[in-house]
Image (spheres, rainbow, N blue to C red):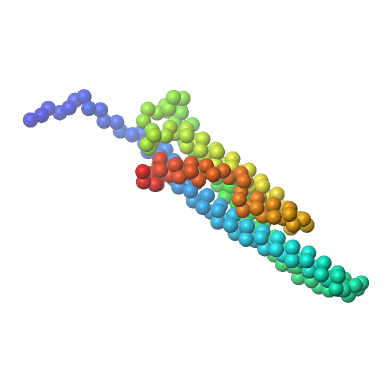
Amino acid sequence: MEAPCTNSIFITPRKTDLNSARKIKDNAADWHNFMLKWEAFNNTGFSIANRIVNMKLSNQRQSEIMREAFEGEDANSNLGMSNFQYNKELEECCTELLDILDKMIKLELKMEKLCATTKGIVDLDTYQYGESGREMPLFHTWPIKYFYEISVQLTQMYKKELQLKRIIVQEIAHTSSSDLMMVELSAWLYQPYIEEKARLITESMLLETGHRSL
């Protein structure tokens, strides 16, 4: 009968380690879900903004035609009736776009809270293991600080993009230049502040935490 191996070392994970791992994993899933929601809001917002631009361009063409076809009071009367309907529809679209912006503002605040939660987990880890960190990673290979660094990068991207969205919402209904309207539409759709690496690092985070199979 073999003697028990007295040199074996069994390491029982701390309860705080298990809690940290669970929270980090939940945060990774939240980032993925928040980004999907943002994309849905962005697509809806673009559709509304596109309607606003088409409405404005159509109204500009119609106004020019009426001015050429009618003169004096007849032109003013026809333009007045047309503008009343146009203003009503434009106001409805602007209200819808503001509603989308409000949803994006709330979502970006959730992203900031997610980033703050991750920082709290990292601070606790530093308190327990020192600046050098734990010897064994929580999951596969990433040091715990990397989760916070990624959260900061993502939060900054969406924060800057939200600022751009605010400007577009403020300006698009008052822009008269067709070229400028096209620029605003393009900026909304392609989101210049959300870099290509955002999707890559989020997928990497899902892989590291076990949401995606290696």
User: Residue at point 72% right, 67% down?
Assistant: 89
**Residue projecting furthest to the right:** 72
Q: Choose between 88 and 176: the one closer to the eye.
A: 176
Give left or right: position of 133 versus 12: right
* Residue 134, position as x, y percentages in the image: 40, 28
Left-right relation of 63 to 172: right
Residue at (86%, 70%) from the top-left corner? 68
Q: Quadrant of the C terminus?
A: top left
Q: Quadrant of residue 196?
A: top right
Residue 128 as seen in the image, left or right of residue 82: left
Count numbered badges in the picture.
0
Task: In this rendered view, identify the residue nearer to me: 74 or 65.
Answer: 65
Task: Identify the residue shown where x is 35% and y is 33%.
Answer: 14
Viewport quadrant of the N terminus = top left
Q: Position of residue 125 (x, y in %)?
A: 44, 31
- The reply, left or right, for residue 209 in relation to residue 111 is left
Q: Residue furthest bottom?
A: 74
Q: Nearer the viewer, residue 75 or 146?
A: 75
Q: Where residue 94 appears, x then y in whole percent?
A: 70, 60
Q: Is residue 199 visible?
A: yes
Foreground residue among 34 and 212: 212
Q: Is residue 61 above or below residue 162?
A: below
Q: Residue at x 38, y 37 (%)?
A: 139
- Indicate the quadrant where residue 41 lies: bottom right
| Residue 103 visible to the viewer | no
